[in-house]
Image (spheres, helix red, strand yellow):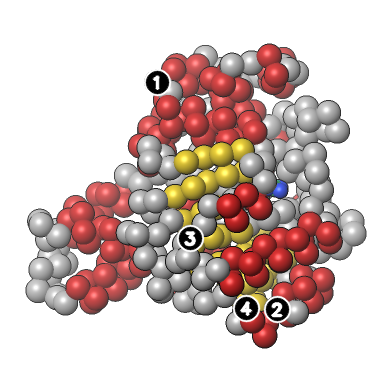
Amino acid sequence: MNASTVSNMPTKEKILEIKEKFDVNVIFAQRLLAMVEQHNQFDEIANIIKNRPKPFVKWVGGKRQLLKQFRKMDLYPPHDFDPIHNTYYEPFAGGGAVFFDLLPKKAVLSDLNKELVVTYNVIKNNIDELITSLKKHRYEKEYFLKVRAKNMNKLSDLEIASRFIFLNRTCFNGMYRVNSKGQFNVPFGKYNNPTICDEDNLRKVSKALQDVKINVEDYKKVLNKVQKGDFIYFDPPYYPVSKTASFTSYTKEGFLDKEQIELRNTFLELHKRGCFVMLSNSDTPFINKIYKEIENEGVKINKVRAGRAINSNGSKRGKINEVLITNY
Ligand SMILES: C[S@@+](CC[C@H](N)C(=O)[O-])C[C@H]1O[C@@H](n2cnc3c(N)ncnc32)[C@H](O)[C@@H]1O
């Protein structure tokens, strides 16, 4: 086949060809085809791919490296999800890796982390001023400590977003951790000239967010919004692999047995409503047990091997198993 033309193939084959050639998910492949079909150029697709946005924060538990594997296992995206008429929800958005991979037309993102959500919205609505502000930051320990000590309640949304991105880019391992008063307390990180303002990507992110709603709210609020046929991806704080390995919380509230069971019940409720639901978690006896209890409803526990750094002790980093729970 001629490398730069897609003209003479049936639509389904064209989509599969794009999916393989550009290593993207099938929904994004459909969008790409629709965008370029008038011109029939693969080169144009390559250009769009090169210019797509990526997550603007480093986020512990970021899913970017796992998505390829989900696709290979044919677990993502759900075949029957219709991205034209239905909506994609990511209620534990974090860095939004799945949103940025899927780039759906209709999407709702939410997270309990107020600073993160304010930042998404400032990128969406006030990108020029944000870039001007980010360019003023300096990578110096004393300056970092001064910015870190600022009281978030006294800052404007623009200042919150600028501080949030700066701290994320310059703190140890890009971690987010707050003390019992909700004050960010991750130490200064040692980097070689870190990029604080990735203007190019931030502008792309801003464009991609224009039709997206981004809210500060508990994940359970999705129950008030979803319709049959919508696709919901849950990426909650993981159940700890061992007592000592527990990665301390993203928010002031923990996310242990009680919370995981409530989430499982929310999963089941969405399943019963006819939504497509996908959920990540650690491959631990507790998580397997609570999802086994609903296997007879048509819920599947898929095992995934992942390399992720959730332990601050370097020697314990490495491959650990995850589960990807699906109802399709
Ligand atoms: C594992 S991270 C998500 C990572 C994300 N998928 C990514 O690719 O970067 C979990 C997120 O859930 C948020 N969170 C914790 N408890 C929550 C709750 N009850 N409702 C909504 N979000 C919550 C945290 O603030 C954190 O951003």
Whichever of callouts 4 and 3 sits on the residue coming sooner in the sequence is: 3
Q: Residue furthest bottom?
A: 296
Is disc 2 placed on a helix, strand or loop?
loop
- Identified by mark 4, the residue type is Val
Label 3: few (<14), some or many (≥20) within 10 Å?
some
Image check: 243 left or right of 13? right
- Toward the viewer: 271 or 286? 271
Q: In the depicted view, which residue is nearer to us: 317 or 276?
A: 276
How many labels were placed on the picture? Answer: 4
Rendered residue at 51%/34% (across/down): 120
Q: Secondary structure at mark 1?
A: helix
**Which is more foreground, mark 4 or mark 3?**
3
Q: Residue 110 shows which numbered tag?
A: none
The disc placed on residue 128 is 1
Q: Amino acid at mark 1?
A: Asp
Circles 4 and 2: CB atoms closer than 8 Å: yes
| Lower position in the chain sequence, tag 2 or tag 3 | 3
Q: Nearer the viewer, mark 3 or mark 1?
A: 3
Above or below, comparing residue 128 to residue 177 in the picture: above
Residue 133, given in percent of the width and then of the height, sits at: 50, 16
Q: Is residue 310 above or below residue 163?
A: below
State the residue position of label 4: 299
Mark 1 and mark 4 lie on one chain; the one further toward the N terminus is: 1
**Helix, strand or loop at disc 3?**
loop
Residue holding disc 3: 227
Q: Residues within 10 Å of mark 1 (few under 14, many from 20)?
A: few
In the picture, the disc for residue 294 is 2
The structure residue drawn at horizontal position 51% and vertical position 71%, both measured from the top left corner, is 274
Tag 4–tag 3 contact (CB < 8 Å): no
Q: Is the C-beta separation of discs 1 and 4 under 8 Å?
A: no
